[in-house]
Amino acid sequence: MSDKPVYVTQPYLPPLDEFLPYLEQIWANKTLTNGGPMHQQLEQALCEYLGVEHIALFNNGTIALLTALQSLRVTGEVITTPYSFVATAHSLLWNGIKPVFVDIDPVTLNMDPARIEAAITPQTTAIMPVHCYGHPCDVAAIQKIADTYNLRVIYDAAHAFGVQDAGGSLLRHGDLSVLSFHATKVFNTFEGGAIVCPDAKTKQRINHLKNFGFVDEVTVIAPGINGKMSEINAAFGLLQLKHIDHALARRAAIDARYRAGLAGIKGIHVVEEAGQTVANHSYFPLLVEADYPLDRDALYQRLKDNNIFGRRYFYPLISNFPMYSGMTSAQRNNLPVANRIADKVLCLPIYPALDDQDIDRIIDVVRRG
């Protein structure tokens, strides 16, 4: 078997000769940013592909999160999950908002709606759940709570590109959904992001905010930021979109091969897909239980020793980093499930170029323990 390095994820790169005509068009029209032709085409194409009406492109997902909060004028406290990438909570701190962490569901690994109401205070203005690994949150329960307490809902949907539930795109839920198009994501623009907006008025406000607040060359209506996506990133997104169905199909095949190969290994629990009618297989998380011969970190190292580079997504928890650890909601006794999962989780490599031989090599290392 090959022993070449295998990483947890790699960007899908279409043939270079397919990208060159896009670059030639950019050179010809001499527009590099500020909503050029590629930008406009990608917004329209993504709306059509994802089944949403309005989408605003960004230079990355973190700036999109920051701007989403600004656009809804969120203040005070926001209830969120500790089990995510740090950008989720950082976007709150950067807006002067206090994150309030609640525990996660032990099956879906998403925010547990049963924990939300107890965390609501007079200062609470919003809920920021995460569709972790692209698995849908309990959107109905979260929306019911938000409606009862008049709270905004902003979904960190960084992992959820293309995911659908029984009603259509998962991105239609909440006041806003925020996507990441980072190179590690299912769909990428090298670096980028987007906000899915419910109406044209909201999209217009977000477009102003991502361009310094400019309406025209002499009019600034808001303290905006520079969140614009470049034409080169948009062009790469247009090319990626031509290949996305192939990429998703290959991810599904890899997921199925892992599940078959890892079945029956004592102490290895593969996290189930949770409630999608269309999944994107953005990650392949498993839990290393106490009856496996190695603990999680030892298996992580065993894989590394075999040139297989998994990731402990998400470990440590956001709530354990120093800028959050002093908060009452971040204390370990308030987050028992999230802490337990963070100590056991390991994501195996999954990306379209991962071949069957390497998948079997990974399975063999896990099976040998």
Image (tube, helix red, strand yellow):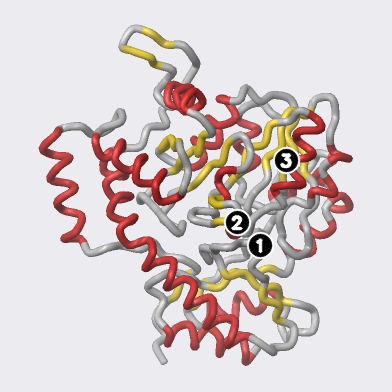
Q: What x and y, as percent, mark residue 65?
A: 55, 37
The quadrant where residue 129 appears: top right
Q: What x and y, as percent, mark residue 359?
A: 48, 83
Quick check: 116 left or right of 350? Answer: right
Taking the spot 71% from the left edge, 37% from the top edge, the residue there is: 127
Question: Which residue, given by chain and number where applicable, does mark 3 sit on?
Answer: 143
Is there CB contact under 8 Å for labels 2 and 1? yes
What is the CA distance from the residue labelled 2 to the residue labelled 1?
A: 7 Å
Question: Which residue, given by chain and number where applicable, does mark 2 sit on?
Answer: 165
Q: Residues within 10 Å of mark 1 (few under 14, many from 20)?
A: some
Taking the spot 81% from the left edge, 30% from the top edge, the residue there is: 149
Q: Earlier in the sequence, mark 2 or mark 3?
A: 3
In this view, the residue in front, 97 or 146, is: 146
Q: What x and y, as percent, mark residue 109?
A: 72, 59
The quadrant where residue 343 appears: bottom right
Question: Which residue, given by chain and number where applicable, does mark 1 sit on?
Answer: 275
Q: What x and y, as percent, mark residue 58?
A: 42, 37
Is the residue 298 above or below the residue 347 in the image?
below
| Residue type marked 2 | Asp
| Disc 3, SS | helix
